[in-house]
Image (cartoon, rainbow, N blue to C red):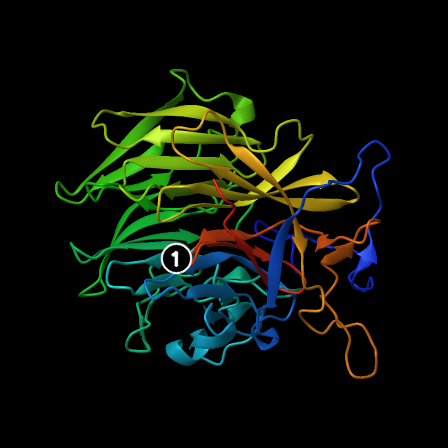
Amino acid sequence: MRKGIGCVGLAGWCLAALTVAADGADDPLPKHWLQATAYAIPKETTNQGSGYFSIVCGKNGRLYIGTAKYGVNAYLVEFDPTTERMRIVVDAHKEIGTTATGFAAQSKIHTRNFVGPSGKIYFGTKQGYPEKDENRTEYPGGYPMVYDPAAGTTKVYPIPIPHQGIISFVADETRNLGYVSTCSDERPIESSHFLVLDLATGKYTDLLDTRHMYAFIVLDHRGRAYHPILGGEIARYNPDKKRLERLRQTIDGQPPSADSRLADPNSHPLNWDVSPDGKTLYCVPMSTNLLYAYDLTGDGDVLRGKSLGPLIPGARSTDCRALCVGPRGDVWAAVTERKHGIDLGHLVHYRPGDSAPRDLGPLAIRNPGYTEFKDASGKELPWHHGIARLADGTVTTKYVLLGVCEDTSGHVNVLSLAPFTLLRIKRPAP
């Protein structure tokens, strides 16, 4: 599990599973826990117990989850809530026709995944991390892909920018257009191209290099596409006029403050998702504790936003890499706070019209024996150290949470690390 956004560099990976986490002397353990049922992502699809924010609910009610197998391959996994079974539906290397390994491999599906009105799943592949003596030019580039669950087929589009992976891929099926964001993974400032893809011909139009890390592209109710730009501007592409605009943003009528991380000069990951009617954009900067909303109905050169309040009131530090808007317009965030010697995971909910987001509580695993943590000889399996047992016996996750989505069966779904795990929480009553 490599250092980077969406995963963490973890020391002491050989720690025993279900180790007891240290308690904070001044922090009593929670009395109320949200119970989650855990399911292990197929272990042959990941080699470091990790994945990213790649989870979405399809039109068929099944979940589609991307995996990371560094230096080897990437897979799209389908979870059927009815049978509680998982299966690989896309083998990226098989679809591309490559046997590349090391840094040249397609090591991740890092895109959040997008579901079109047709039910097709839009996603893309991305590079891993170069090892010693590997050059970044060895990675050929990422491929946008479209999986059709009804037909069981996958369409692969060409590499848009050589040597850069795919971090976002969404589609406007009514106009037969796709929108792609690439990532070079360079530091401190990376290259990130915002492109239009003709879904019929496979031809790209490169709009600009936004230089913004880990971008999410969203579409509004008029089919306009939005992409963050380094420094706080927002790119908006109008497909009807074939025009790219650069918008300033305001929060509560003022330019974003430095501590908001919304206009970071060195870039900062922004979790974006849009309401079902395409009129509101929600945002949580990864390292802040606030939810924001933007009005997408305007035409001017200013995107007007407002603060909706903290995710976890009183938290000393938070990490949010998982934000989604559900099919009924509810906003969900899977957030961690550093507490009790671990990154304690919470589920946060916001319903449009609420005075502020509501922390529904920390997550507990109701079935801690959901997977094997040791091999046949009793030896601890590597990359299975992400589960902790607290002093009161509660079993929970230890590290940052990765992705979240609400499905059509009344559950909220969260991804966790080491082992790569799907956590399903029955949607709490209003």
Q: Outermost residue toward the right?
A: 25
Q: Is residue 296 left or right of residue 89?
A: left
Crowding at mark 1 (Cα within 10 Å: few <14, some 14-19, many 20+): some
Q: Is residue 274 left or right of residue 127?
A: left
Q: How far from the left and from the top, in percent, is residue 28?
A: 80, 36
Q: Outermost residue toward the bottom?
A: 376
| Nearer to us in this view, 105 or 395 | 395
Q: Quadrant of residue 377?
A: bottom right
For the N terminus, give its image quadrant: bottom right
Determine if residue 34 is in view. Answer: yes
Q: The residue under label 1 is which amino acid type?
A: Thr
Q: Outermost residue toward the left?
A: 241
The kind of secondary structure element at disc 1 is loop
Residue at x 55% of width, y 75% of height: 101
Q: How far from the left and from the top, in percent, is residue 340?
A: 79, 42
Decide: is 176 above or below 153. above
Residue at x 44% of width, y 67% of height: 140
Decide: is 118 above or below 280. below
Q: Which residue is mark 1?
A: 408
Q: Is residue 333 left or right of residue 159?
A: right
Decide: is 227 above or below 180. above
Q: Is residue 420 left or right of residue 242?
A: right
Determine if residue 188 is in view. Answer: no
